[in-house]
Image: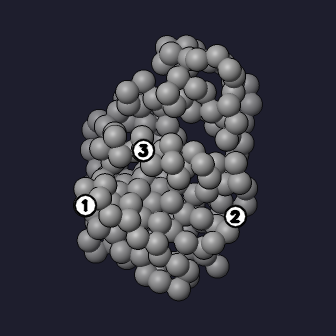
Amino acid sequence: MEQYSNKKFSLFEFNNLEANDENKYELIDEIVLMSPRPNYIHQQIMSRLNLEIGTYLKEKKCMVFSEVELEFDNNVIIPDLSIICGLNDFNIQRYKKAPELVIEIISPGSQYTDTFTKLYKYELFGVKEYWIANPKTEIITVYNFENKTNKDYGKQEKLISSVFNDLEINLSEIFL
């Protein structure tokens, strides 16, 4: 992720920012961050997680969304994947409540933002569980903010969500 400008932006200014490119823009602590579109491996992992979680949620009143804009405390953050159960709480473009679960897949330029800045912001916002998928190490780190715990799951393990008790994902199906 790159800083878009040295200028600090209000939420109003961010909302009126005109970007004429394919990049993703987020507002965190008055700083506009820009990241390019994800690479093939990133998209592959995101697609597989989306499929596994979407299948699990089929009979539930929740949905998995890719790159939905979350707005809270004058921040606009766009996670790779979010599980949202309050489907009536969307405005036209953004979701303004905490998702149950958020997933970020680390890209070469996003490691610090995903593992520190967003970790802190998601916890403050009230997200219950946060997964950070690392394509290089083939590990997903699960942070449970309710229990104040975290656990690493490797490629040969079965990830078990603490928020959705019967959601289990074989990571050998995610990291091929």
Q: Which residue is mark 3?
A: 120
Mark 1 neighbour density, 10 Å: few (under 14) some (14–19) many (20 or more): few
Q: Which residue is mark 2?
A: 41
| Above or below 41: residue 170 | below
Residue 124 picture quarter = top left
- Residue 159 in the image: x percent, y percent? 42, 76
Q: Which residue is mark 1?
A: 147
Image mark for residue 114: none
Number of the front mark, 2 or 3: 3
- Residue 145 in the image: x percent, y percent? 31, 55
- Circle nearer the N terminus (2, 3): 2
The amino acid sitting under disc 1 is Asn
Which residue is located at x 42 percent, y 24 percent? 74
Say left or right for 81 vs 4. left
Mark 2 neighbour density, 10 Å: few (under 14) some (14–19) many (20 or more): some
Quick check: can you spot residue 165? yes
Residue 32 picture quarter = top right
Which residue is located at x 55 percent, y 63 percent? 133
Say left or right for 126 vs 6. left
